[in-house]
Image: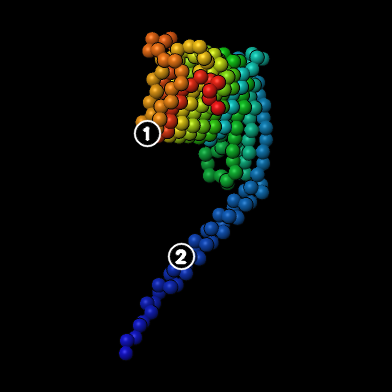
Amino acid sequence: MHVTRERRGSRPLWLAVGGTVFAFTVLACVVTLLSWLGRQSETQRQEYRRPARLQIDVADTQVVLHASYSGTVEVERWLAWSSGKPVADEVWQGDTLRLSLDCPSTPHLPGCSTAYHIWVPADLSLAVTTSSGEVRLENLSGTIRVDTDSGNVEGTGLGAADVTVTGGSGDLRLGFTGVPRHVVARMSYGDVTIGLPRGRAYNVRATAVEGHRNIGVRQDPGAPTTIEASTAYADVTVRNASDVP
């Protein structure tokens, strides 16, 4: 007669592991629930004189820049948090105004988020650096530079300027109402779409490594406006502004 013997010790061990995992799961759910129940929000406003240049450095913050005709820089900060309150760091360095707004780097409960809405003179030179978060540019005509690791970038009503946008993942859309001087639009993972005014020829240099190139503007290698657009794993579209949905 064959006798099957149960191996001792294995079942209690699995029960202990399962109980520990369950306890941590319940704890995480409770912490998340308490953090959202205790969530606070606040809107702050600040006004600055016009700088020669505006520099915005954020980690995980939505940034929206609007054209204004007041001649000043008007800053609206939106903060939401559960434990550590986000902190703004806004300083002058010479004639450059540097703005920063992020959640605390120390451990904190879930639920922290931030956003910048900033009204600037339309022709102001500006730069935005962000690791994650949406960037929107509305009706601006100055020199613009945006560097992002992750997040969509959208520009509408842009005027004649030098515009440079580089990013990792996310879609990039730029719409121009004025003829730009030089546009550089580079993403690694995401569609690149550029809308340009009709009636002009453009020097277009477009690359889509694993996607499609869609060029719908008149091209001339000797044109005064150069458009450099590239993406690795998506599509590049350069069209007349009215043809871009």
Amino acid found under the numbered disc labelled 2: Val
Res. 210 mark? 1
Mark 2 crowdedness (10 Å alpha carbons): few <14, some 14-19, many ≥20? few
Of the pair 145 and 172, the residue shown nearer to us: 172
Q: Name the element at disc 1.
A: loop
Residue drawn at x 53%, y 58% as measured from the top left: 25
Image-based side of 84 in relation to 128, left or right: right
Q: Position of residue 190 (x, y in %)?
A: 45, 33
- The quadrant in which the C terminus is found is top right
| Label 1 – label 2 distance at C-alpha | 45 Å
Amino acid found under the numbered disc labelled 1: Glu
- Residue that mark 2 sits on: 17
Question: Could you tell which of marks 1 and 2 lies nearer the N-terminus?
Answer: 2
26 is higher (above) or lower (below) than 188 = below
Image-based side of 49 in relation to 222, left or right: right
Residue 48 visible at all? no
Determine the image quadrant of residue 104.
top right
Q: Position of residue 235 (x, y in %)?
A: 43, 30
Determine the image quadrant of residue 11.
bottom left
Of the pair 238 and 142, the residue shown nearer to us: 238
Image-based side of 22 in relation to 121, left or right: left
Q: Position of residue 154 (x, y in %)?
A: 54, 27
